[in-house]
Amino acid sequence: MISIEADSEDVGGLVRAVRSVTGADAIRKISGIRLEKDVLVFEQRFALKTTVSVKLSCDESGKLLIRIVSLADNGVGKIGLGLFQGSILNAIEKSTGGRLVRESDCVLSFDPREHLPFPLEFRAVSIRDGRLSVQLALP
């Protein structure tokens, strides 16, 4: 079992490192990452610049689950984006080349076994007190 603890700065550094290695367009559009209470918050600029809030967890199969809490930080944006959330998640799935898979109208998943060169599973993921805790297993 591998345990990782990270703060907002660490998570931002990890995203920058992944961005430089992969060059993924979707990752280049993410900035201002911070951990607040039990959510991960970041700025994104796919079509418009908005503030996104997500909750992270994992399922019993070892996938990372990303539950969209909010796609915008203002009332009008929340209502407008809420009406199109399913379409927005489809667009996110497409823009990540299938690395993130739409599970429902508010959940995307990432299966590390399909996208990493070694077997890895998520066993526990949580955000508490401004810290991200992740437990990984090598099956």
Image (cartoon, rainbow, N blue to C red):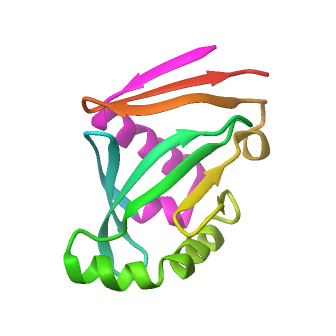
**Label tally:** 0
Residue 119, magenta (yes or no): no
92 in relation to 127, above or below? below
Residue 139 in which image quadrant: top right
- Where in the figure is residue 4, as x and y percent of width and height? 48, 21
The image shows residue 100 at horizontal and vertical percentages of 63, 58
- The outermost residue toward the left is 74
Q: Nearer the viewer, residue 19 or 26?
A: 26
Left or right: where 115 falls relative to 91: right
Instruction: Left or right? Give the position of 71 relative to 22.
Output: left
Looking at the rendering, in which quadrant would you find the N terminus? top right
Q: Residue at x 30, y 76 (%)?
A: 78
Residue 136 % position (x, y): 62, 24
Determine the image quadrant of residue 58: top right
Image location (x, y in percent) of residue 62: 70, 35
Residue drawn at 47 percent across, 43 percent down: 56
Instruction: Inspect the magenta stretch and tell me whether residue 19 lies in it.
Output: yes
Whether residue 25 is situated above or below residue 59 in the rendered picture? below
Q: Nearer the viewer, residue 35 or 123?
A: 123
Q: Is residue 58 above or below residue 75?
A: above
Q: Main secondary structure of the magenta part?
A: helix
Q: Residue at x 36, y 69 (%)?
A: 71
| Residue 31 higher or lower than 11, as above or below | below
For image coordinates 64% across by 49% down, the residue present is 110
Give the residues in magenta.
1-29
